[in-house]
Image (spheres, grey):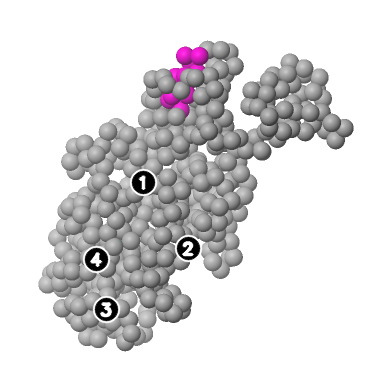
Amino acid sequence: MLRLYDTARRAKVDFVPRVEGRVSMYVCGATPYDLPHLGHGRKEVVFDTIRRYLAWRGYAVKYVSNVTDIEDKIIARAHEEGTTEPELVARFEVTFRSAFERLNILQPDDEPRATEWIEEMTRLIAQLVTNGHAYVVEGQGVYFQVDTLPSYGSLSHRTLDELLESAGARVDVDERKRAPVDFALWKTAKPGEPAWDSPWGPGRPGWHIECSAMSLKLLGDSFDIHGGGSDLVFPHHENEIAQAVGAGHEFARYWLHNGMLNVDGQKMSKSLGNFVTLVDVLEQYDPRAFRLLVLQTHYRRQMEIGEKELSDAEKAIGRLDAVARRVRADGLESAPVGDVTPFRDVMDDDFDTPAALAYVFELVRDANVALDEGLRDTAATAFATLRELAGVLGIELRAEAPEADSEIDALVEAREAARRAKDWAESDRIRDELSRRGIVVEDTPRGPEWRRE
Ligand SMILES: [Zn+2]
């Protein structure tokens, strides 16, 4: 039985999909007004891996993730750059998409864009106005009245009083809202702003309404999994629920949220100056190393990232490619997959990818030992299994990838250490290993030097 941690229930619960054998999943996508950062990369890898695992587990998965192509930040940035909103979004969307492709993120089954769903949104807003959950402020727009919904706060586990208290200090004096926690469903356009027609005059949707409108329409009244970063629990997801429930829908059955990340031990933020773009990391490191590093931390936990973590992850990827090369050289690439139970058991426990990876690397060791000992069938099965499971995690092995220099350096150093310790058997073993990889080592007065044959 698959169990997952539901943010709303604050517990691990059995996963029972709405329709047997099918999973409908909605994950909040990007607002492309700037370069993607590491947090975007983590969220994509986390939910892509969950999607791949569910599919491997036999579910027919429908995966929807939106693109917010109109929003205050987009308008502000386009204005700063002296360009139009569609041009700005189109430009950054290309960057997001190519970064995600390098991370081996599968394309969503549906990728709705907010500006193409305005009618659906205005319909939902009109329903909320009719139901008495929303009100119109002339010249400003339409607001959701939070105190009309007693269950508001149930996802983030806050009471209305607590929310009122924390929102109190942040009241914008220009806004004529009935309460500071009330949030915009529709914003009346100011001169020069992009605008669409609505029953309340020209304007644009508030940020939250698009996800409720598009997920309900594309996935149905009570779809299975809603995901996103933990920074979206409040207010975004709380508001998505309010909009859907206020209009009489059931909405998502399970809420999954991934943790945030620390760069070099500190929370990543523009003000701390440690804001790292995903593009920079993918240029400097094997994208598979970033993916592996993300999965080495459980998705709900805080993740640490820095140069050391990335280069360690790159070495681990090197070990996967190295075993793939050995197996290819020995002609052992086609064998049936062996025991996947340990992998499935840990993944069924709220997608425990660190434990799943530990099993994959146990299989790497098993395959290498079996190859050393000439146990061809054992090696072939271990390899077929590890390749299958790494694939479920979205990590492809590359037998054709040349080994990284750092991998060879490490072997040459290990051989030197064995020689100094007069462990001739070990130093010969490493020399054979190097020569099998086509590496020639020469002992010079400056120490050992190596080159490729
Ligand atoms: Zn959303």
Question: Sequence-wise, which precedes: disc 3 or disc 1?
Answer: 1
Q: Residue at x 31, y 87 (%)?
A: 191
Q: Residue at x 22, y 49 (%)?
A: 223
Query: Quick one: label 3, few (<14), some, or many (20+) residues within 10 Å?
Result: some
Check the picture and name the quadrant holding the N terminus. top left
* Residue 378: % across, % down: 48, 15
- Residue at the far front: name it: 453
What's the distance in space between the residues labelled 3 and 1, CA to CA? 33 Å
Residue kind at label 3, given as amino acid type: Ala
Asked if residue 146 is among those painted magenta in the image, a careful observer would answer: no
Q: Residue at x 43, y 25 (%)?
A: 385
Mark 2 CB near ligand 1 (8 Å cut): no
What's the distance in space between the residues labelled 4 and 2, CA to CA? 23 Å
**Is residue 181 rendered to the left or right of residue 97?**
left
- Could you say which is closer to the camera, residue 100 or residue 158? 100
Query: Quick one: label 1, few (<14), some, or many (20+) residues within 10 Å?
Result: some
Q: Which mark is residue 35?
A: 2
- Could you say which is closer to the camera, residue 113 or residue 130? 113
According to the picture, the residue beneath numbered tag 3 turns out to be: 195
Residue kind at label 2, given as amino acid type: Leu
Q: Which mark is residue 254?
A: none
According to the picture, the residue beneath numbered tag 1 turns out to be: 106
* Residue 124: % across, % down: 17, 67
Query: Quick one: label 2, few (<14), some, or many (20+) residues within 10 Å?
Result: some
Position above or below: 248 against 402: below
In magenta, the rendered stretch is 376-386
What's the distance in space between the residues labelled 1 and 4, CA to CA? 22 Å
Q: Identify the image quadrant of residue 186.
A: bottom left
Residue 214 makes an appearance in the image: yes
Q: Are the two marked residues, 4 and 2, in contact with CB atoms closer than 8 angstroms? A: no
